[in-house]
Image: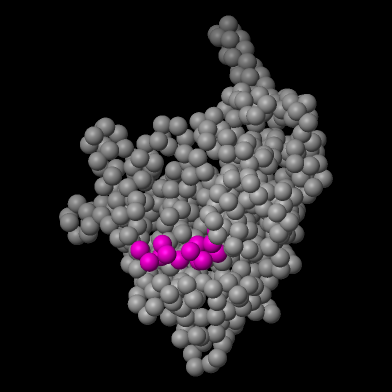
Amino acid sequence: METFGKVAVTIFIVVIMRWAWKVVNMVWLKPKKLEKWLRNEGYKGNSYKFPLGDMREVATMIKEGRSKPSPITHDITSYALPFDHHIITKYGEKSFIWVGPNPRMYVTDPELIKEILSRPNEFQKQHPEPFRDSIIGGLLVSEGHKWTKHRKIINPAFNLQNLKIMFSAIRSSCSDMVHKLELLIGGTDYTEVDVWPYIDNLAGEVISRTAFGSNYKEGEKIFRIQRDQVDLLFQMLSILYLPGRRFIPTRANKKFKQNCEELHTLLKGIIDKKKKAIETGECSCDDLLGILLESNSKEIEENGVGMSMEDVIEECKLFYIAGSDTTSSLIVWTMVCLGLHKEWQVLAREEIQKVFGNRELDFEGLKNLKVLTMILYEALRLYPPVVMMERATVKETKLGNMMIPPGMQLALAMIQIHHDRDIWGEDANEFKPERFSDGMLNATKGKGSSPYFPFSSGPRICIGQNFALTEAKTAITMILQSFSFELSPSYKHSPFPVFTLPPQFGAHLILRNIT
């Protein structure tokens, strides 16, 4: 027994020492090693501070930024990413920040970003990433074989033929929104409206109808929960990257966990209901979920393995937040830009009248709206739905003339590049859709298309970009057919990123009925 006791104590000590070594390595030795490499490569940043790095300062700047509006300007980088802008301004483009014990180096060269995005197996999504993983899952965060399989299963849902089928639902939802705005004006000449809730609801209704064959009311709870989750994450931002954060018994943590369970139950119910309806022949597979389930069944029949129920739930979460937030962001900032630059409203409205006249919008006709396409491209440049992307190395990896060590995070500074005067010219912070008159390739000052990537690029380019652009074109076209508009005196400019780039203080416009 005495020998057994000594062995047990020895094992316990060894386990504790191994655990302690891992912790020390994670929170001190590895960060200091990576910091040394960064400084040897000419990168500058704050010294590492145990255990949160720069996160306390990040949280403070974000809290301050969210509390007040920005000047009305398209030069939004310092407002949208206050801490990142502060670090890059202080240390230069070759700089880095500390996300907890992990350094994150900025990549601002468009060609290097293009290379990173074209090599997704070597430069992967950061795992784990608490902010992202708490809300978004599915295809967006999958890697390797799982991503390849899921992309294959989901691809049919977003092909051109199915987009044409779903167009009537998109058009119907846009028509409903326009009608609600018309009722607000009534018999008056004009009215002031915060259009953001209407656009946000429009995007929610479109994804509910096209993804789940339901109306917005059925998806309302899902949107409420996801919005609540985002607010809770901001409340926990200063501890979000702390190891074991989810076990800290704060009120926000407890509420977040409850919301996760409720969201899972709601989505599982929608999926089960859809599967039963398909099996009994009560509905066809003409929405995103139905097409996904049909494609998944085919994959299982052919290869024996497809998506699990949990996988499908994660993809549905992604449908909701990515499918709605990206598009609503594009539509609202396009309206803000057109409210500031009314001459482009006139040009777009003239083109819409020429293409459609008095007939109903159709899918094919949208392709002929060249001016509106230029306007949307410029809005995406100035106000990209995702302002920055992150990647990480899983092993020593060559990039340009550097050999980057494993475990290094890379911040792909999209919004910095979209506003770079060296790429776009001295008018980089001005709304000038004419820069896209000869297409994306010729919009930059001889730099090609690599500096423009609002939907990412490479093999992992956004699967829903055509869906988003179709919805945005339809919505803006129908709005311009019915209204002229300008910014209200009460408008507060507030492009502050969450997952996408919503206007945190709304979008107050003066609407005038022109029909």
Q: Is 376 covered by the magenta stretch? A: yes
| Picture residue at 47% right of the left edge, 81% below the top | 482
The image quadrant where one finds the N terminus is top right
Query: Which percent across, then down, holds residue 496?
Result: 65, 59
| Picture residue at 35% right of the left edge, 68% below the top | 362
Query: Which percent across, then down, holds residue 240?
Result: 64, 45
Query: Residue 174's image quarter?
Result: bottom left
Q: Examine the rendered structure and indicate whether residue 172 appears above or below residue 66.
A: below
Q: Main secondary structure of the magenta part?
A: helix
Q: Is 214 covered by the magenta stretch? A: no
Query: Residue 90's image quarter?
Result: top right
Residue that sits furthest to the left in the current view: 280
Q: Examine the rendered structure and indicate whether residue 328 appears above or below residue 319.
A: below
Residue that sits furthest to the bottom in the current view: 187
Q: Give the magenta-colored segment's residue range.
A: 364-377
Q: Is residue 158 left or right of residue 303?
A: right
Q: Examine the rendered structure and indicate whether residue 451 appears above or below residue 199.
A: above
| Picture residue at 62% right of the left edge, 12% below the top | 10
Q: Is residue 231 left or right of residue 25?
A: left
| Picture residue at 47% right of the left edge, 72% below the top | 351
Query: Which percent across, then down, holds residue 175?
Result: 40, 75
- Tally of numbered discs: 0
Q: Examine the rendered structure and indicate whether residue 173 appears above or below residue 307.
A: below
**Residue sitting nearer the eye, 197 or 165:** 165
